[in-house]
Image (tube, helix red, strand yellow):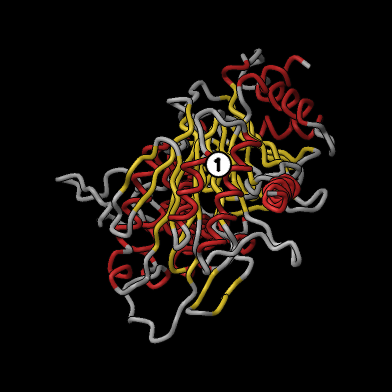
Amino acid sequence: MPYVAPEQLMKDRSDYAHKGIARGRSVIGLEYSNGLLFIAENPSATLHKISEIYDRIAFAGVGKYSEFEELRIAGIRLADLRGYQYGREDVKARDLANAYSQALSTIFTQQMKPYEVEVLVGEVDGEVDGAGIYHILFDGSVSDEQGFVAMGGHAEDLTDALRDRYERGWDLATAVRSAVQVLGTTPETREIAPDQIEAAVVDRTRTQRRKFHRLTPVEVSSALSS
Amino acid sequence: MSDRIELPLAGTPFGASPSFLDLVRREHPEAIPGPGQDAPFPVPHGTTVLGLKFADGILMAGDRRATAGNLIADAKMRKVFAADDFSAIAIAGTAGQAVELVKLFQLELEHYEKITGDRLSLEGKANRLAQMIRSNLPMALQGFVVVPLFGGYDERKDEGRIFYYDATGGRWEEDDYQTTGSGGQPAKNSLKKRWRPGLSAGEALRVAVEALVDAAEDDAATGGPDTTRRIWPIAVRVTASGASEVPEDEVVAAVDAVLQERGAS
């Protein structure tokens, strides 16, 4: 095999992953008054980008579906096993974020091809304002996001748009409406139909143990028209 | 039981197993109860539980007593649980095994729902429970028997359904009501006289409480309502709007009504 400098190798892999992710649509995660909202433009009503991991933890993925789906399932398995062997309150988003980071980092350096994905792991705790979002990239780097985050195809533009608008303490309808407007600013300005929106919340005010709730099409439409 | 189906050429697993039980067996086999030794001492047993249909769905109820030999091991045991949003499970038999089975079954349903993004059908849940009881057979042969009742609201058929099981995993569907546990027979005799099709939710609770009172009168291992220590039966109701525990004051009212009627006669 010809010699390839490690710098070049990593750069090639990174470019490859970036290209793959840039082809897909974006996901926005943000804190609102009752917890966390994950929202995406997704023409499919059944192939989800956003899903439930555990009682207070949600997941979102962008990029190659088969790859983030694999990560999603691994996350649910890790969480359910932990909760069974220890206690339900011992399942933490930080542990999941670390596990994803380790796995993606190993894949990035050791596999032929890196995963073309980015994922979010979000968690709310019982207290007011207690919410956190971890953003994990294809190479395993993790960041702990405050307030809002965008990932996927046009993450930078979306993040800029969010920075201009985002306010703490938005109610759900305002959060959904604003996030959909932001999603509609790139790559070209357009109106996104309600049935193209996938949204879910981790709502700390829910009485059930499982705080995750996927917004129904009716809930999305009514938030958008309010 | 292996959940791994492989593609002939690639040799990679085909499809993600939605089973939590298979996952624990594979990753942490020590964490689930397996065949053990005969216990050389009495272990706690839970006693009487019942399930019945009413107009809007099903109701499951149980007494609170667990016995170990001639001793009362627990006066406040919980034997009736919501299994998920639309089903409930009630257990009789070796208490430790039974509670563990319920925990695993609840996780099995939740895990399936999260992995596939869809709830199991009621039929699917009932079958899965049968398989879990069957896998407990080695323990059952050593005397650690667990016999649950399972019921729920079938969202596809739009009706409440009840299933009961034996220690080998045999599964039968009930048309009206069923009981199990040491006080099961007197409870069933009581239901036979009192139950009728199309009961209201309140009537169903009253009939269930009355059956448990009858069971406690005839079976030493079944605990009746204890008005001194305020220990009441636990009941879970499942209807089209979901599974929920019957609030304590409603149960107390039903108990009072039954006891008053008996005192008066």
**The one of B101 and A26 positioned closer to us in this rendering:** B101
Rendered-image quadrant of the N terminus of chain B: bottom left
Q: Relative to A196, does residue B17 appear above or below in the rendering?
A: below
Q: Where is residue B92 in the image (x, y as percent from the top left)?
A: 46, 61
Q: Position of residue A192 (x, y in %)?
A: 63, 16
The chain identifier of the residue carrying mark 1 reads B
Which residue position is annotated with label 1?
Answer: B59
Give me the residue at 65% from left, 13% from top: A190
Q: Position of residue B86 (x, y in %)?
A: 53, 38
**The one of B204 and A57 positioned closer to us in this rendering:** B204
Disc 1 crowd rating (10 Å Cα; few below 14, some 14-19, many 20+) is many
Q: Can residue B27 be seen in this view?
A: yes
Q: State left or right for residue B180 relative to residue B207.
A: left
Three-letter residue code for mark 1: Leu
Give me the residue at 58% from left, 27% from top: A198
**The one of A172 and B204 positioned closer to us in this rendering:** B204
**The one of B5 and B145 positioned closer to us in this rendering:** B145
Quarter where residue B198 is shown:
top right
